[in-house]
Amino acid sequence: MNNVHTNSAVTSKIMPICGMSEPNEFSNDGIYIGKTMIYKLPFFLDKKAEINPHITIIGMTGSGTSYLLKSIVARSVMLNGCNVAVIDWNNEYSKLISFIGGRVLSIGSDFKINLLDMYCAENRSLKSALDLLNRMLNFEQSQRSLLHIILKEQLKSKKSITLQSLICAAAKVPKGGHELESKLSELMGSPIFCDETDFDIKRILSGRFSINLSSLKDDIERSEVSAFVVGIITKAMHEMELGSQSDTIVVLDEAWRLIENTNEIGVLFREARKYNISIIAATQMASDINNEIIANSGCIFLFRLQSEQDYLTLNSIGILDNESKDMLARLGIGSCMVHLALKDSSSIRKFFIGKVDGVDFENVKLLCGSMRLEISYKRFEECTKEYIGDANCLSKILSYIAENSRNVDLRAFIIFMQSIGLKRPEIIAYLRSMELRDLAIVDAYEK
């Protein structure tokens, strides 16, 4: 009896008892996320059942936020064939885009932006254009005043405003013009101050694309372009007929970097669902997610948070109570809390996922001399399951690939398969199923 008490005390320290009422059933429709922590029930994220299709994901670096986000996008494409537009801060989504058959667009090479001209085209104020340049160059007061005059004159002329036109105008000013010209010239060559804008957001919203910002100089440039893209998404959305757009996901990872720079984020969260557009915003810091985003998110995923302030922020707006806060602080990588608002329920469902069961995007590389074959892990796994009938051999092959970081020498792979009992005809049929050339297979056997 004493042992029972002792074991119970130990267990209670490592696994807090959750007082939240975990739902005992879920819809079988939607995107599979993982199994619940208590009853081990499969949870499917069904945006049609939610009060709002938008998703917010919050968690510290390495907790599993990006893995969940990418898995939701991949499964949405596989299940529903939806369109995808990603604002990719650090080029972290190229493998996902490749996996779903999309295209990565880089500023400068794939499209052009003239942010100055866009400020005029969108009827924004002269002050906005001036503030844009000041954020990047930090002018002295005299330089700012001179630039204000130049911008005002160019706006009156109704000609396209470019960085080059501002530099030329500054060079003609006798007093202080040379210093301003030199300052503005620091931006020459920047892909966001091209002579013209060539950016078709309607095409991007009708396909599967990521807008790669990693080539930009710094976070200031990335923030400006992000705000620009969100702004023209909002404008393009308002030009659509309600419900005319195919299902589209707009991904705002590192969303906290955007929120302080644009008001259109709130507009997207309030109105996008009417146009069949859903937003997925991911951030590391809860304190940077405003109440408007929280209020318009049908589902919020919370992973382990970065600071005590983040827990307090979510507690203050009713997302967390003390009990769920304690559980969240103990979560391991890949585990998360779900805050779900459904159309047919007046109450919020809160429960924990034991571990997100996501989609793997890493490719498997098979090498033999100059031959190099690269296939998706999903396809490799399917071929292995189809051609390797023995469950023990199947498990060993998948473990072997994982141990070699999916970068495998074909000759060593063949030797390994022979060592676990597979015969030559089985191995050849298996390798052919992955479209390996016969010449490469023969060459590997000979060596």
Image (tube, helix red, strand yellow):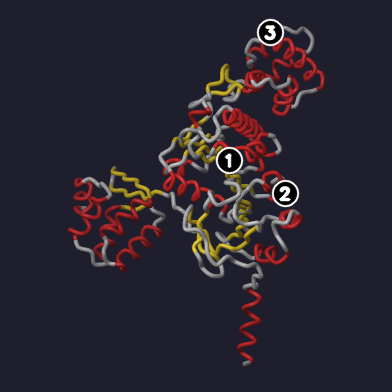
Quadrant of residue 15 within the rendered picture: bottom right
Q: Position of residue 310 (x, y in %)?
A: 72, 54
Q: Amino acid at mark 3?
A: Ser
Query: Where 157 sits versus 119, above or below?
Result: above
Give the mark nearer the N terminus: 3 vs 1. Answer: 3
Q: Amino acid at mark 2?
A: Ser
Query: Where 46 sits versus 183, above or below?
Result: below
Is there any visible trace of residue 215 in the rendered image?
yes
User: Which residue has dot 1 on it?
Assistant: 273
Quadrant of residue 17 within the rendered picture: bottom right
Q: Which is more toward the observer, 276 or 131?
A: 276
Residue 253 lies left or right of residue 398; in this view the side is right
| Residue shown at the point (25%, 52%) measured from the top left | 431
- Mark 2 residue crowding within 10 angstroms, few (<14) / some (14–19) / many (20+): some
Q: CA distance from mark 1 to mark 2?
A: 25 Å
User: Which residue has dot 2 on it?
Assistant: 287
Q: Position of residue 368 (x, y in %)?
A: 28, 48
Q: CA distance from mark 3 to mark 1?
A: 40 Å
Q: Position of residue 207 (x, y in %)?
A: 46, 34
Q: CA distance from mark 3 to mark 2?
A: 44 Å
| Residue shown at the point (52%, 43%) measured from the top left | 92
Q: Amino acid at mark 1?
A: Arg
Q: Quadrant of the N terminus?
A: bottom right
User: Which residue has dot 3 on it?
Assistant: 157
Count of numbered tags: 3
